[in-house]
Amino acid sequence: MKGKKSRSSGGRFSEVDKKDECINPVSKTQEILKLRLSRNHIPSEIFGRQEEKRHLKDLIRRTGLFGESNSVLIIGPRGNGKSALVQKVLVELGEEEDIHTNLLQVHLNGLLQTDDKIALKEITRQLQLENTVGDRVFGSFAETLQFLLEALKSGNQSSKPILFILDEFDLFAQHRNQTLLYNLFDVAQSAQAPICVVGITCRLDVLELLEKRVKSRFSHRQIYLFSNMTFEDYVMLFKELLKLEDDFPDRRFQSDWNKSIEELSEAQSVVDMLKRQFSFSQDVCALKQLLFLPVCNLNEMDVPRLKPAMFVESMKISTSDSKSAMLHGVSILELCLIIAMKHLTDIFEGEPFNFEMVYNEYRKFAQRHSSMQVFHKAVVLKAFEHLVALELVKPVEGGSTKIQKEYRLMSLLLHNTQIMDALQKYPQCPTDVRNWATLSIS
Amino acid sequence: MKARIHILYADQLTWGLSTVFRQAVDIRYQPLYIIDMDSASSEDFETIIDEILEEIPCRQKQISTLVSLFGKRAHCTPGAIFLYGHASTGKSLVVNTLMDKLKLPFVILNCVECYSQRFLYEHILNSLHQTDLFAVNESVSRIKCENMNDFIRLFKQVLSQKGLDKETVYIIMDKAERMRDMESNILPAFLRLQELSSSNVCVILLSEIVWEKFRWGTGFAEPYVLHFPEYKKDELLQILSKGCPTDFPESCYVMYLNLVLSVFHHVCRDLREIQHLVNLNFMKFAEPIRNGEATSKDSKKLWKNIEPHLKKALPTVYLREVSSSQWQRYQAENAGDTEQENTSQNLQGLSHRCHVDLPYYTKYLLIAAYLASYNPAKTDKRFFAKHTGKKTKKISQTAKFRWEASNHVLGPKAFPLDRLMAIFYSIVEGKVAPTANIFMQITSLVSLHMLTLDPRDDQIITPKYKCLVSLDLIKSVARTVNFDVVRYLYDFV
């Protein structure tokens, strides 16, 4: 496991940990599980996907061993194991001796290399050619890439194969002229040097993003990863994520723990929670996140095992409506303004309104009810601006900027149900205000 | 108008600037973390947590959730945590105190300051590296970083240099909503920082805006979202009562707080704002006790004494148009004044909102522009022609029913120059020659942002203008030239 690797360095640390292991297996378990639920973790076995894995492995191996040039796109929704698949394949190929020594890797990410110049620098760095390039000045992108590939040619005149992995592939398509993609695909297609380009993306229409000249150089090999998980698989995944493996030092604790996880997965409330989450999304990352808090709450003294209630609590936190939560915190005055806006939106059937209209509605209401105070316009305007700052109200786009803020057209970004829901739970809400909200059209 | 906006926000601005300076100094004295915290026994840890809970009341749930998410120093954390809640609900306070007390390695930055991505990266890197910004010799140079790619590389480098790769490093970003305005790759990249840099780092985002509004573009990793609810009334009371002066009986102070809250809680929930109001009016409240006119048990008398002052402060809540010292001086001056209306008039005078000084004819021009903007053109005849018909009554009745169409609700309308001049000549006293001087004044009103030139139409032959001043301002302008503007406004006839 990765946890071990990080521990093995530094004498003092390992000593401390050894002591820990003897004292409480719970905290050790917590550490392992936390690492497993974090984003850096590479799973030991990919769930399903054997066919795709074999395909990708074959492709990369052919480049590594025979110098064949390839290009492939891996397409699938987020959290479906695209990156995990690639990483897994790389780990497994890394164990094969001749590929490990022969194949060079370049990892690029669309979020990091935001233009082709940076990308090229990064490629140079990852191929460790900074010294070779030195202060040389190149005319074009293609020339530089050509030079880099030439420089990699070893003594026996054949280039070393390079594997390019482009994460967030769709972002590279937004670069000017798609120079990087054009050149990579061009090299791959014309077999100037053996390279394998693997793009990872979540956009299904990614091919439409490519320019014609880029598209025609792409091999059109695509691997689609769609979620084909059933609910049983999902529960299985849930158990896999929480179970301890056989290499855990304390055997008795491990079997004990795994038994408790089995029991957990059969508890009605946990099954309900999983079912709900499953129908929301089948994203593995979302599930991991859901499990993170219960694992964090483990404690050797009070909470040595995971309990169904912890998962229910975690689910409640992750699915709570944040806008309603924010609404509970506004002042009565701001709440009145929101209700006034709701009425205006109802009356004018979704047409935008301005501050003066809202103030008018508010004043009419406040004057009718003696329990309400009528505040100065400046104070009300400030409250209104606070709502705008919270982005519960938004200026209509395209409106002229040369207009007083009192008259700028706005639209309400809250749904009626959210307002009513907030009113129900609002602490010490005056009855007048509540009645006003339920009034359909005043 | 512009100037007014500036006054309102000046408070926030100076606050932002002060944090710049404070943080510039902070980098120097950032706490040195002690690496062998792990060996500290769990009892120590417990006492620290208890201390924090003691220090920050009413936030137990949030603190304990955060502490359990952080876990032990070497443990993994979620890649990103998003904390949201209203202003002054203790978001920054909780996070900063946790970092300080637990002696975790962290960098804190305010996104308002980072108007370019370079500042963002360099701040994080240099704080982690603890570069001495005030170093006289140039031997230690600042780390320079231009883009995300370099940032990730340098970040890993700094972590391994400083021996921080064994434990979680925290990056705290205040006012995270500003990150949406930066380059589109920054926010997703920070949310995935743990994955991208393959190191144990936790990015904590603080914001007043809900998480849904951050999802834009591609590459998002969902953070762990945690809500900081607003303080309830009794919680506010508990927190505010901590500020009781030492020489003052606490029960009486709580009573005072109750009074203040009962007046202001309707309109204001912001702890900081209420605290400001509490401090502002406390002198007045304590005055009879200090003078010996009343004892601290005399609640009715004290309430009688303070009530008008609180009522007076009510229209100024949140606005901060006058400084605290100005307010106190004003309160002292008006001590003997009992007339309510009079005081509220004076208060208006305190703010500069309704005060402009313009040349005589310009004032008339402005009034004419206002009338032209807010009156329908077809009613001009009725207001300004010498002989009016008998339609007055009928129109005023219909006007009352059609408030939706009223210009004071919908906003000013554009008018041609001819109409402005016609109204001007009919309202101005004495004869005025249509010289270039008069027309110059129109241009200067435009440059003062009191009028605006409508860009849609032909700007040379038939320029169209719109009046941008408020009714309050035009009333005060009209008062200075003895002109009853309300009589000429269609909406008020």
Image: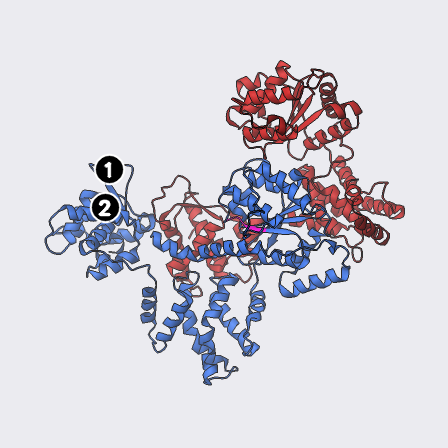
Chain colours: A red, B blue
Residue closest to the far bottom: B292
Query: Mark 1 packing: few (<14 Cα in 10 Å), some, or many (20+)?
Result: few
Secondary structure state at the residue bearing disc 1: loop
Q: Is residue B131 above or below residue A197?
A: below
Labels 2 and 1 touching (C-beta < 8 A): no
Chain letter for mark 2 = B
Q: Quadrant of residue B32?
A: bottom right
Residue A183 lies in the magenta stretch? no
Q: Which mark is first along the chain, 1 or 2?
A: 2
Q: Can residue A352 be seen in this snapshot?
A: yes
Report x, y in % for residue A111.
Answer: 58, 35
Q: Which residue is mark 1?
A: B459
Which mark is on residue B489? none
Residue closest to the far top: A190
Is the same chain shared between marks 2 and 1? yes
For the C terminus of chain B, the image quarter is: bottom left
Q: Which residue is mark 2?
A: B443
Q: Nearer the viewer, residue B193 or A305?
A: B193
Q: Nearer the viewer, residue B163 or A79?
A: B163
Chain letter for mark 1 = B
Query: Residue drawn at (54%, 29%), measured in percent from left and top?
Result: A117
**Stretch in magenta:** B108-112
Residue closest to the far right: A252
Q: Quadrant of residue A372?
A: bottom left
Report x, y in % for residue A150.
Answer: 63, 19
Q: Amino acid at mark 1?
A: Gln
Secondary structure state at the residue bearing disc 2: helix
| Number of numbered discs | 2
Q: Quadrant of residue A65?
A: top right
Q: Nearer the viewer, residue A61 or A36?
A: A61
Q: Is residue B434 left or right of residue A194?
A: left
Q: Nearer the viewer, residue A274 or A165?
A: A165
